[in-house]
Amino acid sequence: SRRPRAGFARAAGRRLPVPPPMTKEKLRANLRGLKARVIDTSALIARHVELKAQLEAAVAERRRMGEEKAAAESTAALRSAAEAAVKQQLEAARGEVQQHKTESARLRTRLSDLEAVLLSERSAASSASQAAVKVSLAEQGATTREAAVLERERELEAAIAEAQAVD
């Protein structure tokens, strides 16, 4: 059941009504309407082209944003891995620092023990040196006394010999 298009005088054995003749004013008004439609159609086509360009730009922007998101996720994953590696290195360094502190404390204790031993040895050496000096002085004193005693003995022997010679 197709309807015949306007402009065919006869369709399917029927006669279509013919419109009354148009006046110049009606023709001009009709022409203005058609021109307005053509302008509207051109505007619609231009709008369609503009919207299509916007759509393509939006698709390109979305694709770019997707690529940026993927790059950002990749960067975040690399940053996370780098942070984990740095944290691991930091923990290892902290362990080494703790080991060095422990070793340093042990060495300070050993150093203070050795200093105490050194002081003790110096004290003993000083005491021994003082004792040696005392012994040396005592020996010198004894030698001096011996010399004085020997001198006195000689004097006494000389006095005895003189007394015997006088008698």
Image (spheres, rainbow, N blue to C red):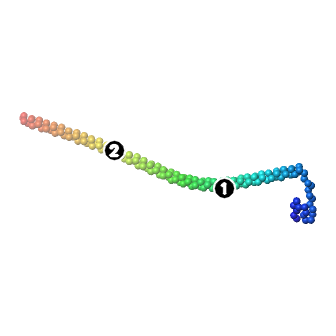
Q: Pick whichever, 96 or 103, lies toward us.
A: 96
Label 1 or label 2, whichever comes before in sequence order: 1
- Rendered residue at 29%/43% (across/down): 129
Find residue 120 and report its horizontal and vertical position in percent: 35, 45
Name the residue rendered at 42%, 49% in the picture.
107
How far from the left and from the top, in percent, is residue 89? 52, 53
Tag 2 residue = 122
Kind of residue indicated by mark 2: Arg
Quick one: SS at disc 1? helix
Residue 80 in view: no
* Residue found at the far front of this picture: 24
Residue 156 x/y as whole percent:
13, 37
Which one is in front, 18 or 141?
18
Query: Tag 1: residue type?
Result: Arg
Labelled disc at residue 63: 1
* Quadrant (top left, top right, bottom left, bottom right) of the C terminus: top left
Q: Residues within 10 Å of mark 2 (few under 14, many from 20)?
A: few
**Residue 126 coordinates in the image, percent (x, y):** 31, 43
Q: Nearer the viewer, residue 159 or 69?
A: 69
Residue at (92%, 58%) from the top-left corner? 18
